[in-house]
Amino acid sequence: MPDSLNDFSSIKISRRQKTPLYAQLYNTILSRIQNGQITPGYLLPPVRKLAARLGINPGTVVSAYRELEQNGYIRSRAGAGSFVAELPTSPEQEPEDSIDLFEIPATEHDPSGSNIDMSSISLNPDIISIEQFKRLILKVLDRDQGHAFSYQESQGFGPLRESLTAYLALSGIHTTAGHLQIISGAQQGIDIIARALLAHGDYVFTESPTYPGAIAAFRARGAKIIGIPLCRSGIDLAILEEQLRRFHPRLLYIMPNLQNPTGITYDRETRSRLMGLARYYNVYVLEDDYIRELSYAKQPLLPLKVMDRDDRIIYLKSFSKIFMPGLRLAFLTMPSALADRILKVKRLADLSTSGLTQRVFDLYLREGIWQQHIRAIRRIYRTHYQYTEERARFLLPDKIRLLHPQGGLSFWGVLSEGINSTALCAAAAQNGLILTDGSGFYPLRTDTSHLRLSFATLTPAQIEAGLHILSRLLS
Amino acid sequence: MPDSLNDFSSIKISRRQKTPLYAQLYNTILSRIQNGQITPGYLLPPVRKLAARLGINPGTVVSAYRELEQNGYIRSRAGAGSFVAELPTSPEQEPEDSIDLFEIPATEHDPSGSNIDMSSISLNPDIISIEQFKRLILKVLDRDQGHAFSYQESQGFGPLRESLTAYLALSGIHTTAGHLQIISGAQQGIDIIARALLAHGDYVFTESPTYPGAIAAFRARGAKIIGIPLCRSGIDLAILEEQLRRFHPRLLYIMPNLQNPTGITYDRETRSRLMGLARYYNVYVLEDDYIRELSYAKQPLLPLKVMDRDDRIIYLKSFSKIFMPGLRLAFLTMPSALADRILKVKRLADLSTSGLTQRVFDLYLREGIWQQHIRAIRRIYRTHYQYTEERARFLLPDKIRLLHPQGGLSFWGVLSEGINSTALCAAAAQNGLILTDGSGFYPLRTDTSHLRLSFATLTPAQIEAGLHILSRLLS
């Protein structure tokens, strides 16, 4: 092994430049790869050693390496370090309208369980009643026999679409089973809408920050994404209007209730003015109802879809998220004008969602068990939310400010100037605390001043311990 | 309602023109729609009445209407007839790289059961042991508890990838769990490969005829599709080579064993020369192992993948097809050079395939039940195959010639000149026999001289009755 550390000790990076340190390091390594100074298989220096040699934070090196890896220039193997990747060469080159290289943050960070995981927003697996599930799946199998495994109509199991229609009516959404498409989770829903609605080069507006899986799906379709900032009352209407006028997007992707990752809920006026703008600029709205059920306020939150007078909102609802993530089950409402295309895209994407899962979930709705489940988890997580809020107020320094969403499974933290979220998360990881770096939620990763802290899988003692670590790192 | 029949009685169509009758009718109606002579909502004349007025076969009118519908110009509603559709207008126009409007043939034609269904290639639902499935799912739930429902790693459940690796080794495919991607059925696999590998305008070669779902997925990606004809020994190598030289495709999609829909199996020489061509022209091969297990010959069929010396074959295998179609479970092997992109596309498509299904199927493999299942269905369907073959030889006239695939769940029928498959299928449907029109298996629907006859869900008495109807229609 050549002494790669020496190769890199002459690198010039400076705190006085405007470009962040990690970006300087990224650019230096990239230009060496592109010049052929270092070639595929070349082992990069270990993070800590390079950081020590350059007199910078290890987190900065981690950030640079991570960006290089995400862009395909280097690869990492556990225990073996990072090395320069084989670059694609003609005729093996990447398609032009390239699949996005943006990573969707992993959803299970710490199977070992030795760290405190404030990144996972999955429910604690113990919350689900296995006995209940067994009873219902046996009921389906006894009732439907082999038909439970037959090819499933692409649009979805008819009785499930009927029971969903009745369930939606309770929230004020009036639709028909014929306008529902069953899908394999919210991610598939976003991807299907991208494929059914968008042409290469179309503009899509998202909230900024937003769910990275949505950014990946829109980019894969070759869409241009513009992020509209959020304020306390919801999406920033002034900026939204100005950008609508300039770019005439085809789609607006939003989470008006307990937005991911900020937890912000749109107020009444924002909702009503947003609908007016959508109408005036003739843009479709994809409402991702992320986690509305987990509102801890007295009044239940209403979907934006209830205000949809001209069939322009596609309402997307996942049951995976706060129920059984591994089952991959969600649905969306189809505007009549888009129904044909949505049905066709779903069909070519995977023919159908598992019919057995649909049959079981239909019983959950019909027997009211889903509704009981929601009430139960709301009770549990309200307590965890309040505990986290209270302890954070007591333990965390002023350098981080938490938003108070009054719902959901996480808090959005705003860091004081000068604190880099990516570096902080790297440092936290080294201290046994897994946080979600906020930068991944920005379409261009331009922001490094936010964190997401989740309490979804933690006990009060773990919440306390995690906040202690974070507090120490910020002091 | 205006008398639309009179509007159409002046149409000029002629048997003397080279253009088929249905295409003449299609073009006439289309030009009236495009001229604005007939407008959205206009009710077209009923099939039989128009056929009688023009002195043509009702099947011809059906074909013309169907093409118009598939291209979005008209819509049909049961009981209400066919009417001119709303045409998309700016800014609601369709994306440029348009989702393909090709229909994937429905997989369940006749839930009522009053017809004889020779179109379904799903197994008879009674073949699956519900008790066995119950036992295994309960075993998984007792073992894994709530973790059975947790977010699943995107690449697939590790133990399943391990047991698949061992299973593949038995057929001579040597790979690792790290090179397997679990997917939600073969259709998703094809779609993922299209998205990971193809850029807009890339060429893809398929067999002709081929699986329509593949055509739809490649078209949706903006690829140009060239169908290579099949002969008895497999793909036509002379034409393949000439077209490879001209178009340098990125991907070749084939089913070398018991091809769908023809049942053709490539011979040794074709396999070996094909691999040479693929290497020379540097093209990836997507091998869809459609139904290899159902070979009724003495020697088991080998996957083409066993001959893959330079990591160019993507081997795709669905377990849905001959097991539990509704479960949506399949996998593919990833060439190292494509693995990163395939993983990313899978992730943005639906995050993961149901973890519960994967856990259950893992036990099917580990306990050898899958293997027992294959042996059992091979025994059953060999008998049905032989029966159908024997009765067809006795009952069917010379006007249809069946290929003898020695495997699978269907026969491919070649019609004598002058018999139109689309019209024949329409006539059969009116007589209670559901057949699959072969034209849907051709990328440009240019062929109307083939049928697929399946015996997958039929009793011997139904097979006999179906062949009688077909025979009568051909006499």
Image (tube, coloured by chain):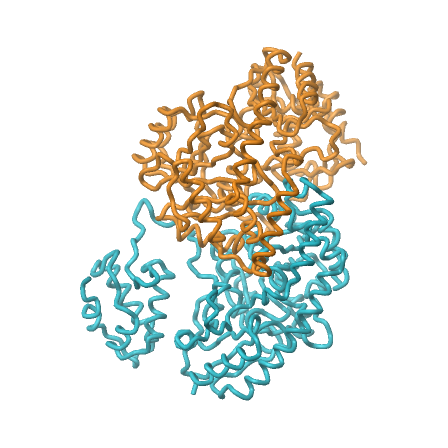
Chain colours: A cyan, B orange
Residue A469 position, x and y percent, is: 46, 81
Q: Residue at x 40, y 33 (%)?
A: B304
In the image, is A383 to the left or to the right of B6? left
Residue B335 position, x and y percent, is: 37, 45
Residue B266 position, x and y percent, is: 42, 26
Q: From what the image shows, is residue B401 above or below residue A64? A: above
Q: Residue at x 29, y 74 (%)?
A: A48
In the image, is A186 to the left or to the right of B210? right
Q: Residue at x 50, y 81 (%)?
A: A465
**In which image quadrant can residue B166 be found?**
top left
**In which image quadrant can residue B314 be found?**
top left
**Residue A336 visible in the picture:** no
Q: Residue furthest right?
A: B1
Count the labels in the image: 0
For the C terminus of chain A, the image quarter is bottom left
In the image, is B382 to the left or to the right of B471? left
Question: In terms of depth relative to the viewer, which is nearer, A336 or B231?
Answer: B231
Question: In terms of depth relative to the viewer, which is nearer, A204 or B35?
Answer: A204
For the N terminus of chain A, the image quarter is bottom left
Question: In terms of depth relative to the viewer, which is nearer, A281 or A221?
Answer: A221
**Residue A356 visible in the picture:** yes
Residue B180 position, x and y percent, is: 43, 47
In the image, is A59 to the left or to the right of B391? left
